[in-house]
Image (spheres, rainbow, N blue to C red):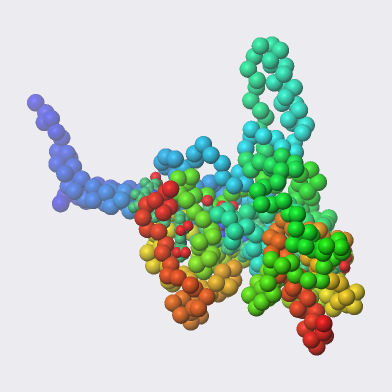
Amino acid sequence: MPAIFPRWTNNIPLAIAILAPIFGAGLVGGVWYYFSPKFTDAGYRPIQPVAFSHKLHAGDMGMDCRYCHNTVERAAHAAIPPTQTCMNCHSQVKTDSPKLAPIRESYESGKSVPWIRVHQLPDYAFFDHRPHLAAGVGCVSCHGRIDQMTVVQMDQPLSMSWCLDCHRNPEPNLRPLDQITNMGWDPATEDYDPKADPARKRALTPPEHCSGCHR
Amino acid sequence: MTRTTATRCLKGSLLGAAVIAGGLLAGCQGNRSDEPPVHLLHNMDFQARFDAQEKNDFFYDVDCPEEAAADDAAAEEAAEHGEHAPHRTKTCYGRAMREPVAGTVARGHLKDDDHLYRGRGADDRLADTLPVQIELNAALLARGEERYNIYCQPCHDYSGNGEGVATQRGGGFKVQPPSYHIDRLRAMPLGYFFKVITDGQGTMLSYASQIPVEDRWAIAVWVRTLQVSRTKGGK
């Protein structure tokens, strides 16, 4: 009678002993690395219907973010500018540029330009730009060097742990209240102490309790 | 350890290494991609509500009258045959944010204060004073400077010479903005600058939708400040 288990099966336990930890570690590592919003979300860079460049407008020409995203200090939502905002200038400059054809068409027909949304929190999370800007958190802390991007991309993961990392210790991310849109302002080189700033009237209390962001 | 075991282990670990390498090739954190973020569990990421500026295919708005008419005709035809209306062709969308019916006045926004909202005094001429609601102080000037540098500086430049960076590039503006320091504009009442911001002037479009009323007055004061700074105290 031949043996039920051929000889080579003796090696199975050894192979499992060696491979299983490798596989297990690989799996855990893979999930940790690839399932994180740092992988799934950060770096999202949709191709927009108009080749609008923040590097040209906000970087080279030094336009303030609030010229276009003018509701950012007044509303939860930082409005994407309507076509008229572009036409303030583009009725005067680059009026024949083919790159701007969708803008001119939109201005004439009243159709919205179908900009593709880049940053989007899940609907169950609440975010409001106002308290953050009023507290002196700069755009750059959450959106990266937009003024150097020709195509906007998600710079930060916008995950819950990312929000909380700052809420637990906001101090290193604070800047003078008149520098919020200054992308070049670097807390590492500036000597700024938020506690000594007379423009700040109260201590900040970013919420860490669940209902602060899940309301 | 026999030789076969050793080769098997080697093969096994090679296989493992290949799997890991394959995984790594899938990309690194922060890699650029134009694929929308993948969320394995969608849970309640997208709820039955609309965010600001989202599209809504229930409405057509002014967006596409032809397509709306075509869809309505299709729906009518379907109704005649006793069928359900076909799905709307989804090439164009309305906005989830609805505009109020024409003529709607929000509470407290009748804007019947001519001085504050139109820059005109009791005699319906452009006023040269600030409305009573707005007080001239250092904070107003600081606000005016900040807002001017956001909204006007790209074209009129920091000192109001009309040589802002946006007018100098890409072929230049067809109509250059004038300097604020010409006699005609120096003689203008304060309300005139408010009116230009609110209604636009010539080729300059209106900034009323971008700048709230109080800020427009602050900017007007800053424009006057720029003018006065060149006339040794002036008015």
Tell me residue A64's x, y (percent). Answer: 66, 67
Q: Residue at x 76, y 46 (%)?
A: A106
Q: Camera-side residue: B135 or B72?
A: B135
Count of marks overlaid on the render: 0
Q: Is residue A61 left or right of residue A92?
A: left
Q: Residue at x 77, y 33 (%)?
A: B65
Q: Is residue A64 left or right of residue B122?
A: left
Q: Camera-side residue: A97 or B12?
A: A97
Residue B211 vertical position relative to residue A41 in the rendered view, above or below: below
Q: Is residue B11 left or right of residue B65?
A: left
Q: Is residue B20 left or right of residue B27?
A: left
Q: Residue furthest bottom?
A: B232
Visible residue check, residue A53: no
Q: Residue furthest top?
A: B81
Q: Camera-side residue: B231 or A133?
A: B231
Q: Residue at x 82, y 71 (%)?
A: B128
The quadrant holding residue B112 is bottom right
Q: Residue furthest right?
A: B184
Q: Camera-side residue: A206 or A17?
A: A206
Q: Residue at x 48, y 82 (%)?
A: A191
Tell me residue A5's x, y (percent). Answer: 14, 33
Visible residue check, residue A172: yes
Tell me residue B214's x, y (percent). Answer: 69, 64
Residue B91 vertical position relative to residue B121 in the rendered view, above or below: above
Tell me residue B234's x, y (percent). Answer: 82, 84
Residue A185 vertical position relative to residue B67 in the rendered view, above or below: below
The quadrant holding residue A33 is bottom left
The quadrant holding residue B168 is bottom right
Q: Residue furthest front?
A: B122
Image quadrant where one finds the N terminus of chain A: top left
